[in-house]
Image (tube, grey):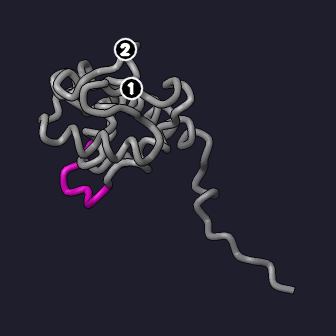
Amino acid sequence: MHELPWRTVPGLLILAHLAGQEAPSNIREIAHHSGIPLKKVGPLLRRLRRAGLARGAPGTGWRLTRPPSEITMQEAVDALPAGPAIEACRMDYEACALRTSCPLAPLCRAGDDMLRTLLARMTLADLRPVVPLLP
């Protein structure tokens, strides 16, 4: 399975929280509902603002800049710190002990399903190296 660097996960949890809110959320609410320490929420929100995914300021609350259906997971991952995957979300739905409570579980489930579909379509012949045709 693919790994998601653990430094990326808190930002995705924040985005997942904002995606479920109609009204702006303040930093304390975001920290409480996403499980991210309060001191880490502010820097992540500023990073999401620079990437154009969230807007807000102290006293006004934070919200997404577009509807959740218009923000791809790739945009979200690209906007967040990656760093080394020393600790990582292994994105393995079947093996995850948190899958019933993690807001990223649908992403992991879809990733598992897509990988299984791809593996079912491919054969060992697909792994042979492609030899370029020379003139």
Q: Kindly tell me whether residue 105 is visible in this rendering.
A: no
Magenta: main secondary structure: loop
Percent coordinates x, y for residue 38 in the rendering: 13, 34
How many C-alpha atoms fall within 10 Å of the one at disc 2: few (<14), some, or many (≥20)? Answer: few
Percent coordinates x, y for residue 12 in the rendering: 33, 36
- Residue visible at 53% across and 43% down in the picture: 119
Q: Secondary structure at mark 2?
A: loop
Percent coordinates x, y for residue 93 in the rendering: 33, 31
Question: Eyeballing the image, is 49 above or below 14?
Answer: below
**Comes first in the chain, label 2 or label 1:** 2
| Residue named by callout 1 | 63
Mark-to-mark CA distance, 2 and 1: 7 Å
95 vs 59, nearest the viewer: 59
Q: Amino acid at mark 2?
A: Ala
Q: Residue furthest bottom?
A: 135
Q: Is residue 2 left or right of residue 9?
A: right
